Image (cartoon, helix red, strand yellow):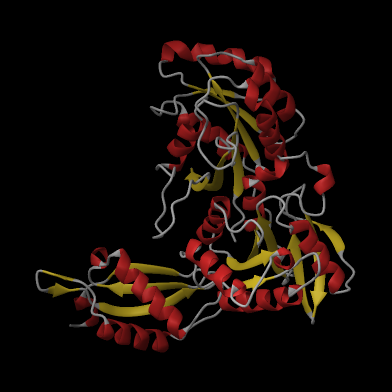
């Protein structure tokens, strides 16, 4: 996982957070996916400015009931104040840089002051983006936001672009330098993610208690995260604290659902992510959103169906439930699935051994000779596309890296390869080497025949 800084956009509804998010990311990520069978809202994306890479997180949707959609249409912010306060508190805890977005034309509102009151409690950099100031004549209106006493105020128009570059200059100046990784730490790092009340805290405690180890809390790579080390069968693991685990009593009711930042922070450092589902409620849209986040970040993934002891069962229940979940998660058919009860400990003993299997798959390397035999066989069994009598020809394939396994295919016409054929190659690759629980990346690069003396 990369250790990119997290930059959070916070603020009241209808100030243009989502528009600014799309402008900075450089493309619309509001309901897009490259994966067939899933459509999800995206609230985060990687960006780079002046050589500094960071992950931008849009909290613009967290005022909505399910916590995942774009900003509400209501002009009245009062009903959203509790949620706005929650997002500000989480930004303080988990973001590296915070951008409070305000409506420059509307002036300072009570909701803006509410957010500012919370943000002043942090020593992290805070920048005010005074949005909707399209003309130079109106940019003087931004200066009244200095009364919030937070930080630099940048007038801009997220819709049209002016001033966004100035904001990015200030953001990258505020991004903290990357912390050096601890080369001596060879533990397998596990993040436990899921909707609220799926049993994350109970699972962590059961893993720690059942293995009868002494858990020592150690400081994580961020100021607020607490990791827990444990040793199992000679292997060291690190459990990464995610939204609310082991500290539920300290979290305001309802806050856990506003936890995209926390999930991103955990994923930045995890080798394997455990996606916890609630067997009683079944899989929901938010579960598939979280699953999409895991595949986007190329984490190793294990699906845990918790509270299985609470479900009335017959001979076919487990099979039917697994089939239904896999249908909803059809964009990640390679993930192992374990039906557990964190409360009773049922099958919890299988979790860490499966984590080791998935982590091993993430680091698996395939010999180049075997890969080239694979592509010859695959292209023979199912010839690639052709146009005007010219067929796509594969020359060479090699594995470029691991974690996630990444393969580069050298081909004469990479643009002619459609989604279906790429999916065919991935399926064939997994038939020979399953890469259990890990996404893989296939990259297609052009290379001409004359490079091979033909």
> From where the camera sits, is residue 247 visible?
yes
Q: Is residue 163 above or below residue 420?
A: above
Camera-nearest residue between 164 and 356: 356
Outermost residue on the left side: it is: 388
| Image position of 226 (left or right of 390) | right
Q: Residue at x 60, y 61 (%)?
A: 1
Residue occupying image coordinates x 20% and y 77%: 449
The image shows a total of numbered marks equal to 0
The structure residue drawn at horizontal position 52% and vertical position 32%, both measured from the top left corner, is 71
Relative side of 130 to 393, left or right:
right
Q: Is residue 126 above or below residue 381?
A: above
Residue 307, x across and y down, in percent = 72, 63
Residue 451, percent across and down?
23, 77
Q: Quadrant of the C terminus?
A: bottom left
Query: Which residue is located at x 23 percent, y 68 percent?
Result: 413
Q: Nearer the viewer, residue 243 or 330?
A: 330
Tell me where residue 153 sits by quadrant. Answer: top right
Indicate whether 98 appears above or below 265: above
């Amino acid at each position: 996982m990369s250790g990119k800084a997290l930059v959070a956009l916070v603020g009241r509804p209808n100030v243009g957070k989502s528009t600014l998010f799309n402008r900075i990311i450089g493309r619309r990520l509001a309901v897009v996916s490259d994966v067939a069978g899933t459509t999800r809202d995206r609230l985060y994306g990687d960006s780079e400015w002046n050589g500094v890479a960071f992950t931008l997180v849009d909290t613009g949707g967290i005022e909505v009931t399910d916590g995942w959609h774009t900003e509400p249409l209501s002009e009245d912010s009062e009903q959203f104040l509790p949620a706005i306060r929650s997002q500000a508190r989480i930004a303080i805890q988990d973001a590296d840089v915070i951008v409070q977005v305000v409506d420059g034309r509307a002036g300072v509102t009570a909701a803006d002051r509410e957010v500012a009151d919370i943000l002043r409690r942090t020593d992290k950099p805070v920048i005010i983006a005074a949005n909707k100031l399209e003309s130079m004549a109106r940019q003087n209106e931004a200066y009244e936001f200095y009364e919030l006493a937070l930080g630099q105020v940048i007038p801009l128009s997220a819709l049209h672009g002016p001033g966004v570059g100035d904001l990015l200059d200030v953001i990258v100046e505020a991004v903290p330098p990357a912390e050096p990784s601890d080369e001596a730490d060879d533990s397998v790092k596990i993040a436990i993610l899921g909707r609220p009340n799926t049993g994350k805290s109970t699972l962590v405690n059961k893993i720690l208690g059942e293995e009868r180890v002494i858990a020592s809390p150690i400081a994580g790579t961020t100021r607020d995260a607490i990791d827990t080390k444990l040793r199992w069968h000679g292997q060291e693991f690190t459990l990464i604290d995610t939204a609310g685990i082991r500290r539920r009593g300290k979290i305001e009711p309802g806050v856990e659902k506003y936890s995209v930042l926390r999930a991103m922070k955990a994923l930045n450092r995890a080798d394997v992510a455990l996606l916890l589902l609630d067997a009683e409620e079944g899989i929901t849209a938010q579960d598939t959103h979280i699953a999409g986040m895991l595949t986007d970040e190329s984490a190793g993934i294990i699906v845990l169906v918790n509270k299985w002891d609470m479900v009335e069962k017959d001979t076919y229940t487990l099979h039917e439930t697994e089939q239904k979940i896999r249908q909803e998660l059809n964009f990640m058919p390679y993930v192992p699935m374990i039906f557990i009860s964190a409360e009773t400990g049922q099958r919890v003993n299988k979790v860490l051994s499966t984590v080791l299997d998935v982590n091993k798959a993430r680091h698996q390397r395939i010999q180049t000779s075997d890969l080239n035999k694979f592509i010859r066989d695959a292209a023979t069994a199912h010839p690639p596309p052709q146009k005007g009598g010219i067929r796509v020809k594969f020359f060479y394939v090699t594995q470029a890296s691991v974690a996630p396994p990444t393969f580069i295919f050298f081909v004469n016409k990479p643009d002619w390869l459609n989604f279906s054929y790429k999916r065919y190659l991935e399926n064939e690759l997994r038939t020979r080497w399953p890469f259990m629980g890990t996404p893989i990346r296939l990259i297609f690069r052009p290379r001409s025949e004359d490079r091979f003396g033909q």
